[in-house]
Amino acid sequence: MALELYNSISRKIEVFEPLKKDKAVGVYTCGPTVYDYITIGNCRTYLLGDIAVRVLKYNDYDVKYVMNITDVGHLTGDNEGNADTGIDRLEKGAKREGKTAWTVAEFYDKDFRDGYKRLNLIEPEKFCKATDHIFEQIELVKKLEENGLVYKINDGMYFDTVAYEAKGYHYGELSNLDQIKAGARVEFNQEKRNARDFALWKFSPVNEKRDMEWDSHWGVGFPGWHIECSAMSMKYLGEQFDLHIGGEDLKSTHHPNEIAQSQGATGYSPFVKYWLHGAFLLVDGGKMGKSKGNAYTLHDLENKGISPLALRYFYFSGHYRSPLNFTWEALESSAHALQKIQDYYLEVGLPSKTGNIEETYKIKFLNTINDDLNIPQALAVLWELVKDEKITPENKKATLLDFDRVFGFGLADLKQEIIPDEINELVNQREQARVSKDFAKSDELRDKIKEMGYELNDTDGGAKVRKM
């Protein structure tokens, strides 16, 4: 089965056919704004990029993968539907922490990349920071200006959507932005020619020195949020590329603006052939938010002794285009399911040279992942394989390793733990207590084992112990 993806532009599932015929594919994922810790909701978007890249590689495509790091220009007004208002999120983070915007960006950028590794996400060929590409952004705005698509007002340089459409383009293909009326959703800047117009370059406030500002021939200021992704994606992937990925919230303004400014600058259409958008993550059936105290981070999980890989497994329980509801109970269930896979893999023993990939299961697996990245169904194929008693352990292990090229559970890196003799002795004593039906003693020994940093699970094959 050929790879098929739901394209947000066409609003239908399409057979994936890259722009180039040599199996080379360019992929760009919108990354974090590094003013605070990323949430598990943000992580779902980055996992979508990871899975898309893994599935493309599984289909033998040569993937060039790029992700941006937004460290300037993303204003707080984006929460209210107007990304040109409010204060820069990095400046906000600097005031909150009593540091410079540069220090805040460096800290949360590092934290993001550390978490990225713990989730076992494929690292892009390039993490590109907005502040490292100010020149490219200014040059892109200059090109738009030369093409008659930019005008100046008191607070900055703006993209002219009416002039853009006069050139034969349609603005807002990904959303209903062409239906927005002044004041309908947000407070309208009366200087703008049209409610849909957006900032390309913002001027620094008069008599105020920002941590992050640069000279330009329009005046001292900083780039708008949207221009960075066009400038950096085109620098590393070309003026047209195959696949752009982000959260569904970016369909409203950010991605339509990317399309408009990119096509307006180059004249090439489409800017991107396929657009993938992941659905929101809910928490206990409602929206996630810092004000609600439920904007959980990877640190929150790890403080509860839960591995980020358990979150990875949890994400796989729902299709990327469907909302997924996070609960701690669901995460615990995912952690146990992942542990079963890891335990089974280790119980099979070391890889055997005689192990072969089971073609019947590989075909099933390929058909599911190529069906618009249907990872939940692919997980079902994995469990079917594990339970199939007709398959030899060697072949199961070889096939699991092959599947893990997509799942990313890190099975090949697992090592059999050496359990200390002291712990093994306590496990044996507990088994004797259970046989004797001395359940109080059994519980006491379980608690003691836990206090020593080991988790005990009772399985059909007996008690299994592992380091917590």
Image (cartoon, rainbow, N blue to C red):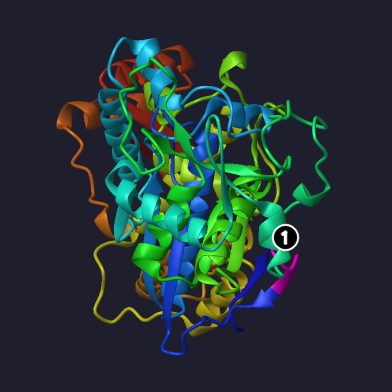
Image: 334 above or below 136 = above
- Is residue 201 visible to the viewer in this orientation of the structure? yes
Q: Quadrant of residue 375?
A: bottom right
> Which of these two is toward me, 171 or 240?
171
Using the image as rendered, state which of residue 184 and residue 244 is in the foreground: 184
The image position of residue 63, as x and y in percent, is 38, 72
Query: Taking 166 as reference, is 425 left or right?
Result: left
Q: In this rendering, would 401 be left or right of 181?
A: left
- Magenta: main secondary structure: loop
Q: Which quadrant of the figure contains the C terminus?
A: top left
- 356 is higher (above) or lower (below) than 257: below
Q: Is residue 75 above or below residue 48?
A: above
Q: Residue 10 colored magenta?
A: yes
| Residue of label 1 | 173
For disc 1, the neighbor class at 10 Å (few under 14, some 14 to 19, many from 20) is: some
Residue 138 place in picture, x, y as percent: 38, 50
Let me know if residue 466 is in the magenta part.
no
Residue situated furthest bottom in the rendering: 21
Determine the secondary structure under disc 1. loop
Q: Nearer the viewer, residue 323 or 215?
A: 215
At 47% across and 57% down in the image, what residue appears?
230
| Position of 3 relative to 148 (above/below) | below
Q: Residue 41's spot in the image, x, y percent?
A: 55, 36
What residue span does the magenta drawing correspond to?
9-13
Q: Quadrant of the N terminus?
A: bottom right
